[in-house]
Amino acid sequence: MKNLVIHPTPTTPFILGNFSNGDICIIGKSTPDKIVDIAKPLEEWIREFIELSDKALTLYIDLCYYDTPTSLTLTGIFSMINRQQGNKQSEVYWYYYSDDDDMMENGEDYKVMSKFPFALIENEKPITVNIKKTDISPLIYLDDTGDFIIQGVSNTDEPLLFYRPIIRWLSEELIIPTLRNISLEICLHNIASGNIPFVQAIIHLVDALHQNGTKTSIQWNYADKETEELGIQILTNLTSHYVFKHLTNREYQQNK
């Protein structure tokens, strides 16, 4: 069974189902023209996972806005888990900003109908993004002028926890735009396979913002063939303007 990856668009969230550990994340805005485009693959993946895996599901849901068809899809998913999980104890983490009473109340309603642990997680809404670099995770910086930097190593074994806040922040821009321009510069090394979908989600969200009218540009820096090929794989077919830059050894060490 393969992982499920649905890239975010101006109207659909980032969805990732990880077969190895049973984690599912749903992050962003969900107002699709055709709910079946995301509901069908998600429901089928969950159903197959429950049948094939001895692990329980853990859903991480961080939606900034969603419509009635999405709400009905979530209701159907929770009902399916209620019926089919058996002895496996699934759980849900429902994230919301502290100033969003509607999202908190929606989570409380879903919690009542769920026969499994359902945690409501309150977060403060960040004004800017400034995540410090570590030995396993990159610097992520985004200011009010639109300068956006992702730089360093991306080897964290918890990419969902690390990347979720920035994916949510960018998704919020689709609802209430605050930036006219975004200039994204990426210089990543040693990108673990489990981190790649989250990096892709960020780039696809920048492209979604471009489609909504934000002026965007993306620069993918690389120092080796593997990183260059990954960039080609991720950036091909975007609507945003993008360029590749080969780093010299000195530049690579400065950006490492």
Image: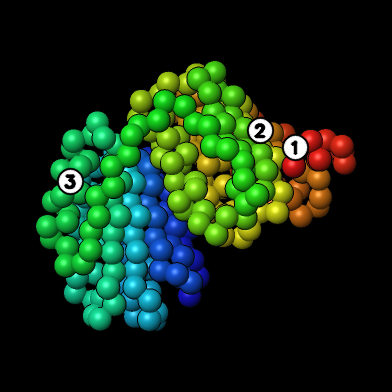
CA–CA distance between discs 2 and 3? 37 Å
Residue that label 2 marks:
185
Mark 3 surroundings within 10 Å by alpha-carbon count, few (fewer than 14), some (14 through 19), many (20 or more): few
- Residue at image coords 46%, 65%: 18
Q: Is residue 199 above or below residue 100?
A: below
Rendered residue at 50%/57% (across/down): 158
Q: Separation of disc 1 and disc 2 at Cα?
A: 11 Å
- The x and y percentages for residue 188 are 68, 45
Q: Residue at x 67, y 43 (%)?
A: 152
Mark 3 vs mark 1: give the one in front: 1
The local secondary structure at tag 1 comes to helix
The residue pinned by badge 1 equals 255
Sooner in the amino-acid sequence: mark 1 or mark 2: 2
Which tag is nearer the camera, tag 1 or tag 2?
1
Q: In this rendering, would 10 be left or right of 156? A: left
Q: Are marks 3 and 1 in contact (CB under 8 Å)?
A: no
